[in-house]
Amino acid sequence: MAGLGGGAALALGGGASAASAATTCEARYLHYRAVDEAKPYAKYMKPHVDPPQPHVAAAASSPPLPTEQVPARGTLGADLMRAGYSPVETGYGRNAAGEVWVACLTDMPGVQPEIWDWWFGWHSKESARYKLWHPDAHAYAALRNATADTPGLTDRQRYRGNVSYVDEYIGASLDQLAINFTDPAKFGIDERRIDGTVIAGYVGSAYLPVNIGLVVHAVRRTPTGSEMRSRFYLNVPGLRAPDLQAVSCAISRGLVPPSAVVFPTRYGAQLLRHCGEEMNHLAGFLPELYGEFGHQA
């Protein structure tokens, strides 16, 4: 997902009451094994992730923005609801409150915004689906509530209010995360003002009862397809209710001890590159994947 970690075992939650996680605990590993290659979507399994778009690579290799250019978290709604572009659409830095901020703009020709709602409800059912997104960094995924293939639900109902547990590398750091997807209105975003869709979630620890940030992907229609305007805020502490089954699975995979309580600014560069890689990579085949598997439930 584009999730967040920091050499830390972090998970995403929203302070909501915990529900039972997936009852099967898959192994954690990068790339694909024979069991993955037997999946019906195996033809979409690329051996390595595509590079980010050039403007993302350039921003991730540049110094952080000055503090005065990094927006406060309270401006997030206005930032993403504007019709045009913000002063910085791709970059990273630390704002005056000490929060690490990341923005990533991804152009996605041929990808309609609604397909992203389907993807976020579909991909966390099993690790092999999640690996399609970033085979070099995604190692494990599971859903708290097994709604990915439940008949009768809208695509948004499959992931909003649900928790995605993922193990992924951001740079060289392996992180155990939980992403609690929620209504974008909680972050001050009126999605009716965006011609597309908005994916929003709290970022926390897969086995600790804490949140550490938030993530929003605003996808809006363009003449050629869509564009994704991603935003991350880290060092935003909070509490979440732990899921005992998810904790048990995290332990069985091997816990990753937290290496930092406060994210350093340089982590923003790693997260920016990761987001740019996975979004550009998936956009290259997402319409075909959706065309084949998007109407099965």
Image: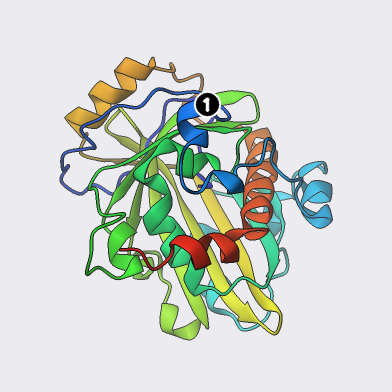
Horizontal relation, residue 268 to residue 6: left or right = right
Position of residue 53 measured from the top left corner of the image (x, y, whole percent) = 78, 55
**How far from the left and from the top, in percent, is residue 6?**
54, 30
> Which of 214 and 141 lies nearest the eye of the viewer?
141
Nearest the eye: 223 or 201: 223
Residue located at (82% from left, 56% from top): 55
Q: Which color scheme does this rendered protein use?
A: rainbow
Q: Secondary structure at mark 1?
A: loop
Q: Is residue 243 left or right of residue 179?
A: left
Which of these two is toward me, 121 or 40?
A: 40
Q: Which residue is label 1 attached to?
A: 33
Amino acid on which disc 1 is placed: Arg
Looking at the picture, how far across and down is residue 176, in whole percent?
42, 29
Asked if residue 205 can be seen in this view, the reply is yes
Quadrant where the C terminus is found in the figure? bottom left
Q: Residues within 10 Å of mark 1 (few under 14, many from 20)?
A: few
- The quadrant holding residue 48 is top right
Q: Residue at x 35, y 70 (%)?
A: 185
Image quadrant in which you'd find residue 49? top right
Above or below, 65 against 7 in this view is below
Say which residue appears at 53% left-offset and 68% top-offset: 218
The reply to whether residue 76 is in sight is no
Q: Specify the quadrant of the image occupied by residue 179.
A: top left
Which residue appears at 37% of the width and 57% of the height? Answer: 121
* Residue 24 screen position, x and y as percent: 25, 30
Residue situated in front as seen by the camera: 290 or 246: 290
